[in-house]
């Protein structure tokens, strides 16, 4: 027996996508400001804790937007609502945590070794 939703959550899909995209743009802008500041002042002198706090709100917006998008997408493709959220929420949160820890480790790496440590083109 198949599940057919009488009212698929298309609006939530669009809202989730919009929230993720706009938060992504905010995160990219914030990262550009941080990197520009690090290049002018030196990454070793700045605090990564302050940078992490500046990035947390846009990253949380991305996580919430992607969660809405994924759960709504699962519902549109035939998952019952409870199963859609039971699959979508853990997958999104786990992926977001992995990306967050990777971003934090990269920022700590740059803070310890400087911006030149990320220049992969000069390493022949």
Image (tube, rainbow, N blue to C red):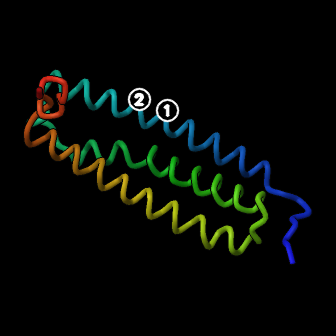
Name the side, left or right, on which 92 lies relative to 108. Answer: right
Identity of the residue drawn at 56% across and 43% down: 20
Give the farthest residue toward the bottom.
1
Q: Which mark is residue 25?
A: 1
Name the side, left or right, on which 67 lies relative to 28. Answer: right
Q: Secondary structure at mark 2?
A: helix
Q: Secondary structure at mark 1?
A: helix
Q: Percent x, y for residue 34?
A: 28, 32
Task: Evaluate if marks 1 and 2 touch, with contact meaning CB atoms under 8 Å apart.
Answer: yes
Q: Percent x, y for residue 27?
A: 42, 37
Give the farthest residue toward the front.
124
Identity of the residue drawn at 57% across and 51% down: 66
Q: Which residue is mark 2?
A: 29
Residue 70 sits in quarter: bottom right
Q: Which quarter of the image is occupied by the N terminus?
A: bottom right
Residue 122 sits in quarter: top left
The foreground one among 17 and 61 is 17
Identity of the residue drawn at 17% across and 28% down: 119
Q: Percent x, y for residue 120?
A: 18, 30
Mark 2 surroundings: few (<14), some (14-19) or many (≥20) residues within 10 A: some
The foreground one among 124 and 116 is 124
Q: Which mark is residue 43?
A: none
Q: CA distance from mark 1 to mark 2?
A: 6 Å
């Amino acid at each position: 027996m198949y599940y057919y939703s009488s009212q698929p959550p298309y609006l939530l899909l669009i809202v989730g996508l919009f929230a993720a995209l706009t938060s992504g743009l905010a995160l990219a802008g914030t990262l550009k400001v941080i990197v520009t500041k690090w290049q002018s002042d030196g990454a070793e002198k700045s605090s990564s804790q302050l940078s992490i706090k500046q990035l947390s709100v846009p990253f949380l917006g991305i996580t919430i937007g992607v969660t809405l998008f994924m759960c709504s997408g699962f519902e549109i493709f035939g998952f019952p609502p409870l199963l859609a959220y039971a699959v979508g929420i853990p997958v999104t949160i786990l992926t977001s945590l992995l990306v967050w820890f990777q971003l934090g480790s990269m920022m700590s790496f740059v803070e310890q070794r400087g911006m030149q440590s990320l220049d992969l083109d000069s390493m022949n």
